[in-house]
Amino acid sequence: MAEPTLTDTAAGPAALRRSPLAHLADRLRDATVTGPRGVAVSEWPYATMVSLRVDPESFAAARVEKCLGAALPARCGETAPAGPRTTLWLGPDEWLVVAPPGAAPLTAELQEALAGEPGSAVDVSGNRTVLELRGPAARDVLDKGCPLDLHPRVFAPGRAVSTQLGSVPLILWRTAEDTYRLLPRASFADHLARWLIDAMSEYALPEVP
């Protein structure tokens, strides 16, 4: 994952872009724990995100699905990967389309697919950031402050839900057995990152027999 940095390859406002956690990059890196109880956290800055609203039973939804290259997730927790993008279920008629930094957001294409029918497709890339928590102890760290049952039989890789960690509302997305992506609002990112650093610290200590 790319480290958060100032974007210096473009002129104008983009050259001043700074991720919500750029000031904590060193602390996040230093918090890494290795070994059998290892855990690490890093920011996935500038991810592309589109807020999508549409009636799933409408003709517009069928056109949107064609544009995305995958059916819209139909139930809580479901996700739909298609190429570099993954669509996360947020509600009966609401989804979040997430793609790696630099990916085309498809906003214009999705708006065209709506074709004037009720719904919306809005680029909200600046609204959230993404933290990736990974390692054998990642689930243990989350269990300290998340009310969900994170056992794989309930929350398997590929699941994503709106929940809370500590006092921070976020979207929690399990992307692999020991890997989770956390999507907080940008204004909560600093608090969440510091909470994670603190919660990870005990795993650097020798395990008590």
Image (cartoon, grey):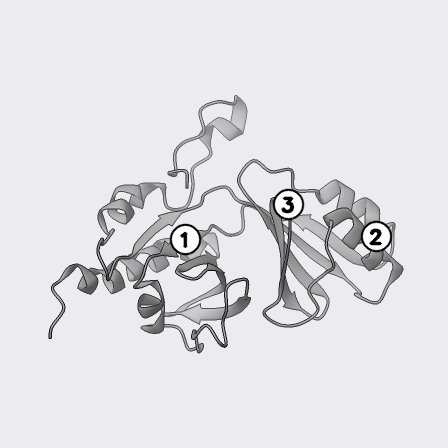
Q: Earlier in the sequence, mark 1 or mark 2?
A: 2
The amino acid type found where label 2 is placed reads: Arg
Q: Earlier in the sequence, mark 3 or mark 1?
A: 3
Disc number lying in front (3 or 1):
3
Q: Residue at x 20, y 63 (%)?
A: 203
Q: Check the picture and name the quadrant holding the N terminus.
A: top left
Q: Is residue 1 above or below residue 170?
A: above
Q: Position of residue 115 (x, y in %)?
A: 87, 49
Circle 2 Cα neighbour tier, 10 Å, few/some/many (<14 / 14–19 / ≥20)? some
Q: Residue at x 47, y 34 (%)?
A: 17
The amino acid type found where label 3 is placed reads: Gly
Residue 24 occupies which quadrant of the picture? top left
**14 sits to left or right of 93:** left
The residue that mark 3 highlights is: 83
Q: Check the picture and name the quadrant holding the C terminus.
A: bottom left
Q: Check whether the beta carbons of the residues at disc 3 and disc 1 lie within 8 A of each other.
A: no
Question: Marks 3 and 1, how far apart in space?
Answer: 20 Å
Q: Is residue 186 above or below residue 73?
A: above
As drawn, the label of residue 132 is: 1
The residue that mark 2 highlights is: 63
Q: Position of residue 7 (x, y in %)?
A: 45, 29
In this rendered view, identify the residue nearer to me: 65 or 209: 209
Q: Earlier in the sequence, mark 2 or mark 3?
A: 2
Circle 3 Cα neighbour tier, 10 Å, few/some/many (<14 / 14–19 / ≥20)? few
Q: Check whether the beta carbons of the residues at disc 2 and disc 3 lie within 8 A of each other.
A: no
The amino acid type found where label 1 is placed reads: Glu
